[in-house]
Amino acid sequence: MAAADGSLFDNPRTFSRRPPAQASRQAKATKRKYQASSEAPPAKRRNETSFLPAKKTSVKETQRTFKGNAQKMFSPKKHSVSTSDRNQEERQCIKTSSLFKNNPDIPELHRPVVKQVQEKVFTSAAFHELGLHPHLISTINTVLKMSSMTSVQKQSIPVLLEGRDALVRSQTGSGKTLAYCIPVVQSLQAMESKIQRSDGPYALVLVPTRELALQSFDTVQKLLKPFTWIVPGVLMGGEKRKSEKARLRKGINILISTPGRLVDHIKSTKNIHFSRLRWLVFDEADRILDLGFEKDITVILNAVNAECQKRQNVLLSATLTEGVTRLADISLHDPVSISVLDKSHDQLNPKDKAVQEVCPPPAGDKLDSFAIPESLKQHVTVVPSKLRLVCLAAFILQKCKFEEDQKMVVFFSSCELVEFHYSLFLQTLLSSSGAPASGQLPSASMRLKFLRLHGGMEQEERTAVFQEFSHSRRGVLLCTDVAARGLDLPQVTWIVQYNAPSSPAEYIHRIGRTARIGCHGSSLLILAPSEAEYVNSLASHKINVSEIKMEDILCVLTRDDCFKGKRWGAQEIRERATVLQTVFEDYVHSSERRVSWAKKALQSFIQAYATYPRELKHIFHVRSLHLGHVAKSFGLRDAPRNLSALTRKKRKAHVKRPDLHKKTQSKHSLAEILRSEYSSGMEADIAKVKKQNAPGEPGGRPLQHSLQPTPCFGRGKTLKWRKTQKGVQRDSKTSQKV
Ligand SMILES: Nc1ncnc2c1ncn2[C@@H]1O[C@H](COP(=O)(O)OP(=O)(O)OP(=O)(O)O)[C@@H](O)[C@H]1O
């Protein structure tokens, strides 16, 4: 049914308001023009008043509320207007469909208040109480500038110094890295026969991402300052294999590696020997040992076990569960379980019980609850799909333009989404000169700085971005889950989850990039109205979020002088949101390539829904999405036709043959997900991503790889094996590339 306000996207299946015959005539005409100009078709049809309501907000209307640069940008020239100028002017009068009408109601969040699991971070115990080598103590005190231990260090270090295996769980940012690094260094420096470089690895530390490998290496290197005969080294994808081989040949005593790269060397390098191995550490163990890494871990354990039987095994994570250790075929010898949980908080109080009854766990599933830093304030906002993009942009402006020294990390579900939003924001919200260029938002500010990080980037750039953001006092990092685990990015004040994570554990790790080691931090989760129930799902894991109303985020748009209007209040906010949306749409529709790039991002967004696990499917399902509305959040004026066809086909198939539907869907998902595989940078067999265009330009980072399944840290957990001509390979339905 057509909407009263003429919203372009009233019906999910009706992406055009024109009658089919006319639509097709129009499409042909548009296509001719498109070919002739090699530009994206201007959405001229929106000037066809017969299909538009009389009272629709246009850019022309909204521009009147602008001043200064804003006016220059949006208003017609005052002087004599040439024909081309008139054409230009006509193009500028493209109407933006109402962002605020025909949206689904935002449900009241009946947010169950749960008591979160808490941990005490610091203790008064000093490092010198541990009986460590005096040089190690002085290095901790003077180089790392630490004197007292955190709770997890106080509990773990003595146990590990006794030679025990351990499973260590404590909240994000509580100092788990030193909890294993200190005992490793202490024990190796104390060995009777002094370690030789050529002895090879005495300790092997496995971590899931390259950035985490670099970070852990940095910590080990600092601790080893007084013990120069012990050589640390890092292996990670993206580095030159040849130079890594050379370093291995010379000898590395504490080896930090991502699993994929280590497997690569085990298979191709004759220089790795584990006969002297004393320590095997799995940092982010639940990730490393999940099914996505299974194959690599099997190869590593086989290689290690073949040469060394007696060693200490340490597994650490903020979300370590018993189930994880059962998955692993690691022969832990009488391990000590270390959990810093404040036991008094672990008891169910009556309120929690009520929540558990409201959201019963899936049959057979034990509900895991993890500690969250006390100083981390978690928020959620429910935003209709049409307003998602504007809302995210407004939130970034609010925090990173109008407030001092804010450092924000925004998580997306795929590399394509990161690239899209990065380029879009760079081109529309930023202005290097201070004065907005044509097509740019007048509120663009020098204070804003955008960076991006994902698995499709060249390693050199990844490292540079990681370093830059780490050392920066402000900025916005747009990233995939490649940055979710373990990274210690100082002074991050806000975490935004633009796409909901697939598990409570991933939620915990993402938000854990802020409020580290007793600092304050906040997080915001953005949900669609149909996804509001996710709040209950989080509550059942004792995760407490409070609501921020969308209007409170959007109202920041009234704070910029450029946005000063006659009206004050809700109406003005709406006008400004519409202008912001128009800026995005104008940018996306300014060339054919940008339109197709936005479509690809939209497709990736939709495909990400296939990766939610079964127990969340009733909340996150592609069928709950209004594709036309979602398209708007990619700056698209219409939902791409092929997407609607695909969705309809799926629906039809679903009605007739549920089994067939399942197959077709998983086939589509698989192809797309694999194209968008989750690369943490360990994969040696992925076709290399090549630079084509300058960064920040659409198409600048092609994200297609060979359809070879690769290890992935899963959003889901389904792995199958299939026979191919090359032997047995694994099918993966697990994850988007990050
Ligand atoms: N005893 C200490 N005193 C002060 N700061 C510390 C201490 N131990 C660790 N830190 C600092 O705390 C921060 C977080 O430490 P670390 O990265 O090891 O946390 P984590 O528990 O491994 O987090 P995650 O679960 O996210 O991986 C680091 O900046 C580290 O330098």
Image (cartoon, rainbow, N blue to C red):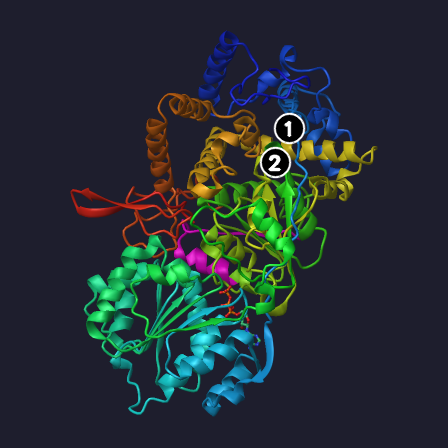
Element carrying mark 2: helix
Q: Residue at x 40, y 58 (%)?
A: 287
Element carrying mark 1: loop
Q: Which residue is drawn at 39% across and 49% down?
A: 678
Q: Residue at x 46, y 22 (%)?
A: 641
Q: In this view, does 530 lie above or below 217?
A: above
Left or right: 394 as drawn, with respect to 703: right
User: Are there few (<14), some (14-19), or many (20+) residues within 10 Å of tag 2?
Assistant: many
Q: Between residues 715 and 601, which one lies in front from this camera angle?
A: 715
Query: Pointer 1: what residue?
Result: 103
Residue 512 falls in which quadrant of the image?
bottom right
Query: Is label 2 in contact with label 1 (beta carbons under 8 Å)?
Result: yes
Q: Disc 2 marks which amino acid? A: Pro
Query: Pointer 2: what residue?
Result: 529
Q: What stretch is highlighted in magenta?
A: 447-467
Q: Residue at x 25, y 70 (%)?
A: 304
Within the magenta stretch, is there residue 474?
Answer: no
Residue 353 location (% of width, % of height): 60, 53
Q: Disc 1 marks which amino acid? A: Asn
Asked whether residue 589 is in view, the answer is no
Asked whether residue 489 is in view, the answer is yes
Q: Nearer the viewer, mark 2 or mark 1?
A: 2
Q: In the rendering, which numbered label is found on residue 199? A: none
Q: Residue furthest top?
A: 21
Q: In this view, does 102 lie above or below 330?
A: above
Left or right: 678 as drawn, with respect to 626: left
Residue 199 falls in which quadrant of the image?
bottom left
